[in-house]
Amino acid sequence: MRKLLLLPLAIMMAACSSPELQVMSYNIRLGVANDGANSWANRRPATIAMLQDRKPDIFGLQEAFDFQIEYIRENLPGYDNVGVGRDDGVRKGETMAIFWNTEKIELLDWGTYWLSETPEVPSRGWDAACVRTATWTKLKLKEGGREFFYVNTHLDHIGPVAQKNGLALIVERIAAMNPDGIPMILTGDFNITADNPCLEDLDKMMKSARVEAPHTDNSITYNAWGNEAESTVIDYIYYSGFKSCDNFKVVNQPYADIPYISDHYPVTTTLKF
C-alpha cells in the first residue's frame, strides 16, 4: 500500500520539476590562424572531447570558420546548427554559430544581423577593426514546449565605439524581439572586462551567470595560450526570464592530451525554467 501511495507522489514531483538547459559559450579560435602547435588541426580532437564530456544542450561558437563547423557536425552527432559567414552573409569568414541538441530542442526561427549602422547587410560598423555579427534563434523544448531565445555574438577587439554601439544594438534588438519576456540567453566574447561601462544597459536588462550563480568560478576565460600577462575575463553568459541559474564554470582542463583547446576557455551554466 505504501508503494502505491508513493507512486502518484513521484509522478507529481517529476511533472512539477523545472526543466533545465546546459548552456555554453566557446570562442573556438579561427581555424585559419597560424598558431603553430596550437593550430586547429592539432587541437580539433580536443574540442570534440570537451563537447562530448560537457554535453551542452545548446552552445554558441565565436570565430568559427565553415570547416570548423563541419568538423563539429561530423564528429558530434545529435546536434544541428545555424549561422552565416560574417563577410558575405553565407559562408565567407567567421560565423557566430549556434548548436543545439536536436533530441531536446526544436528550432522555431533564426537570423543574423551585423553590428553596424546597416545591420541588415554585411558591413563593418563605427571604428571596428573587423566585421561583427550577432546570430539569434527562437527555440522550443520538445518536452513541455517551453520557448526561449538564444543570441550569440562577438564584439570588436579594437574599436571602443564599436564595442559600445554594437552591444547597444544587441540590447535594443533583444528588447524588440521579446516583448512577452520569454526566457532569453545571450552568450559571447565581448572583448571587454566586467567593469566596462558598455555593460551598464545590458546589466539592467539581463543577469550575468558568473555573478548570479551560487556556485560560480572566478577563473580567467581568455588564456592567451598560457600567457598570464594577457589573460583576462572577456567571455560571458547573460540570461533573463529563467527561474534560476544554478552554476557557472570555466572549462579550463585539458582534453585529449592537448593543453589548450583554444586561446579562450569555454564557459558554461545551468539555467532552470
Image (cartoon, grey):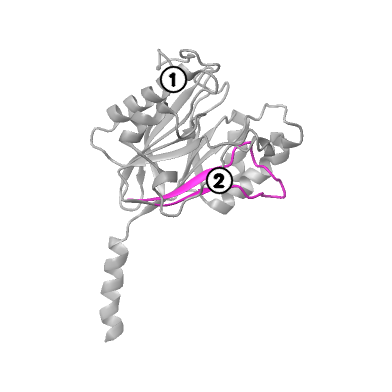
Please, what secondary structure does the residue beneath circle 2 have? loop
Residue 1: image location, x then y, percent: 26, 87
Point 35% across, 28% down: residue: 171
> Which residue reaches farthest bottom?
1
- Relative to residue 133, is residue 243 depicted above or below? below
Identify the disc placed on residue 219: 2
The answer to whether marks 1 and 2 mark residues whose Cβ atoms lie closer than 8 Å is no
Quadrant of the rendered image containing residue 63: top right
Q: Is residue 93 magenta?
A: no
Camera-nearest label, 1 or 2: 2
Does 207 sit left or right of 88 as displayed? left
Point 61% across, 36% down: residue: 231
Which residue bears the numbered disc 1?
A: 115
Does 180 sit left or right of 90 as displayed? left
First-in-chain label (1 vs 2): 1
Q: Amino acid at mark 1?
A: Leu
Does 101 sit left or right of 129 as displayed? left
Give the extent of the magenta segment: 246-273
Residue 143: image location, x then y, percent: 34, 53
Classed neighbour count for the residue bearing mark 1: other residues with Cα under 10 Å, few (<14), some (14–19), many (≥20)? many
Residue 20: image location, x then y, percent: 38, 53
Point 27% across, 73% down: residue: 9
Residue 100: image location, x then y, percent: 46, 43
Q: Count the marks: how many?
A: 2
Classed neighbour count for the residue bearing mark 2: other residues with Cα under 10 Å, few (<14), some (14–19), many (≥20)? some
Q: Amino acid at mark 2?
A: Ser
Viewer-closest of 215 and 149:
215
